[in-house]
Amino acid sequence: MDNEREFKLPWAESNHWCDHLGNPITQVPRSKAKLEGVCPECNKFVSVPKNKKPENTCPQCKKKISTVDWFINAMRDVTSGDGSKFGLFASCSRVAGWGNMPFELMMWKVEDRVSFCSRFGVELYKRYGDDWEKHLQTIDGPLKEYLDRYSAMGTYGHGVIHQAMEGKEYERSEVMDRILGQISGWEAANGVKDVNREASFVNTTIGIGGTIDVDCRTPNFILDWKYKFSKDAFGKLCKKQNADYVCNQLASYGMIRDEKPDEYFIAPILVEMDEKFRPIPGTGQVEYIPLTEKEVETGERRVMRHVDSLYASLNYDPRIMFKEGQCWNWSEILKGSRS
Ligand SMILES: [Zn+2]
């Protein structure tokens, strides 16, 4: 199946990798760059190889076309083959879910073939069950609509909160102001100082890396925002129903950080959306749910098990590659050679 899609989407951390320095990696350079644009003859969105000459042949209508000024697509999504070649470390989120659901396992195996699919695989599975793959080939329209929605929500939450808390310009709305007000209120009440938002770490001994939403040293805690778009999902997470994945994820963040946190928080954020995916005025709520010591310990144990089975299934182990000095860093990957 063709995995070249015109959708450009933010990556979920579950599909990130990272190098041994902790740089998150979602894409690597293509061996041959592509040009992308709309064919002036048949009006289809197409990708063509980047040739020396500006003339190309449209893969759809086979006519000769000029591709001057087309978008250069020089990067492609990371595959597990790249992981093994460069000695990349899997993300905390990926390991948090690994082995919990048979479906996660299945998505991992098809990753190289349809990498974008794994990003939305769980949702596709919910909608189409075991026939998801067959459906995938016939649902480009509805899929795109769904992905647009998913993308809008994810970008909205993470982007806006991050921008706003950093004191940068952000897309103002009554809902976002309420959420940000609750966050600042909680931080003031808890004496929060010395905070990094979106701090990346890797632990080459444990074998995972990731980005922590809020990494605070005074007081010493970590926190992960969880955007929920329905009261039901929000309420369940507040009560930690089916929260194994989230506990694993937070425990793994504690494991990669240079200093063990004293406290771990799940922070569900409720943003209710209308049919046009705009936040509904009057809504917007944040809760801070601490993990118990037992939840952290259980999460850590599960994460260690998952890391081992993950690299066993991938037939490489970046922990060993790192000891042997075989891991590439991000700038070496971009350059295409070890320095
Ligand atoms: Zn054409």
Image (cartoon, grey):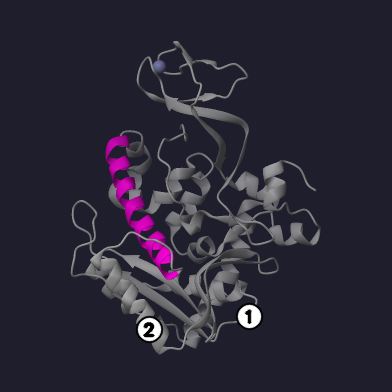
Element under label 2? helix
In the image, residue 58 lies in the stretch drawn in magenta: no
Q: Quadrant of ligand 1?
A: top left
Q: Is residue 68 visible?
A: yes
Few, some or many residues within 10 Å of mark 2 (<14, 14–19, 20+): some
Q: Is residue 81 shown left or right of residue 285?
A: right
> Do the residues bearing badges 2 and 1 touch, measured as CB atoms within 8 Å?
no
- What residue sits right under mark 1 in the picture? 259
Relative height, residue 71 to residue 195 (above, below):
above
Which residue carries the number 2 mark? 186
SS for callout 1: loop
Q: Main secondary structure of the magenta part?
A: helix
Image vertical order of residue 331 relative to residue 222, above or below: above
Marks 2 and 1, the one that precedes in the sequence: 2
Magenta extent: 140-165
Does residue 58 sit above or below 26 in this rendering?
above
Horizontally, residue 168 falls left or right of residue 316, namely left
Mark nearest the camera among 2 and 1 is 2
The residue that appears at 41% across and 35% down in the rendered structure is 6
Q: Is residue 324 left or right of residue 302?
A: right
Residue 5: x and y in percent read: 43, 35
